[in-house]
Amino acid sequence: MIVCVAVVGHQNNPLYIQSFTDADDALKLRHIVHCSLDVVDERVNNPKKSGPTLNETFLGLLYPTENYKVYGYLTNTKVKFILVTTDLDVKDADVRNFFRRFHAAYVDAISNPFHEPGKKITSKTFAERVSTIVKSFGMSSTR
Amino acid sequence: MGWEVSESCVDSLLTEMVSMYCNRLYANKPELAASRIDAIGYQVGHQLSERYTMERPRFTDHLDAIKFICKDFWSELFKKQIDNLKTNHRGTFVLQDNRFRWVSRMSLDPSENGDLSQENAEAAENKAAQEPNMHLHFSCGVIKGALHNLGIACAVSADPSHLPACSFVVRIKP
């Protein structure tokens, strides 16, 4: 079950954070997202460790904490997507699929001429699309 | 989710935008009009580059990003690629398009201008000479916005001396 998704801009400024669980965990989730940004930077700047996946957008499992798994995705424009999930057996293909749909929703939200680059994404349509994607992720992986 | 827009709509919109900024909003200040049009192009390029880099792996260096602009970005916008790319290997690139679509239908001969009276002939000639340049400000803004979004700070200028062939000079800031 996905508990949190976040979009972080190229100056590590948060563009969109949404948690899908009870409110008292929200602060901890934001802290996890913040820590994962360091891991993303490390992955990108250390080409020796990444090897063949140097230029891929999907960064894979960033790090597992005690209850959560954190996945990362870095676009060409240095925008990072962070996914926090509590599932124990998540398929790689599912996460890639999720990020692909999430990227499409993000691009559509960004193309809004009233959206200012660098500011938070306030579009309700984007929020609805994200919750649809999150819900369908849960359903396909628990089949 | 692909929508289609007629090309003549885009042409008309660009022409009207340039005309509005040059003749109504900043009538006596062509530099302000030019920078405003450039800024509009910048935002458009910023958003378009986000969309067109969606499925691609990340770029390794400046040359990759410029090649992306020449091939994929240009094909998405104009259905053709840049015809010639030159570089001095020190941060300057020249992108040449032999038939730049947005100015290909513009009349280039100032004597074809409808206004025939003597005292207005010179002003009309000046305006006609400025018009292709103003359109090119928009295109320069688009390229600049796209490159900035890919992490490359640069200055873009256009060389309109051989219309409809157009060269864009990209200078990467160190």
Image: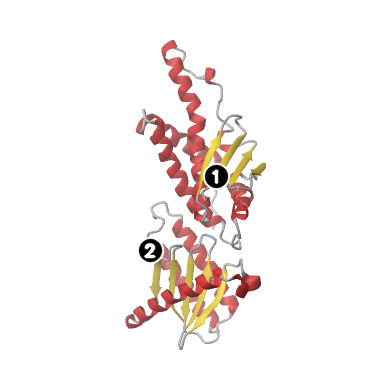
Say few, some or many: other residues with alpha carbon within 10 Å of mark 1 (under 14 / 14 to 19 / 20 or more): some
User: Considering depth in this image, is B104 or B10 the residue closer to the camera?
Assistant: B104
Query: Within the image, what quadrant is residue A49 found in?
Result: bottom right
Asked which secondary structure carries label 2, the reply is helix
Query: How many marks are shown on the rendered structure?
Result: 2
User: Considering depth in this image, is A46 or A24 the residue closer to the camera?
Assistant: A46
The residue tagged 1 is B171
Residue drawn at x 47%, y 73% is A38
Report x, y in % for residue B79. Answer: 63, 45
Asked which secondary structure carries label 1, the reply is strand
Q: Can residue A134 be seen by looking at this rendering?
A: no
Chain ID for label 1? B
Residue drawn at x 57%, y 46% is B77
Which kind of residue does numbered mark 1 sit on? Arg
Figure coloring: secondary structure
Report x, y in % for residue A4. Answer: 42, 76
User: Considering depth in this image, is A123 or B82 the residue closer to the camera?
Assistant: B82
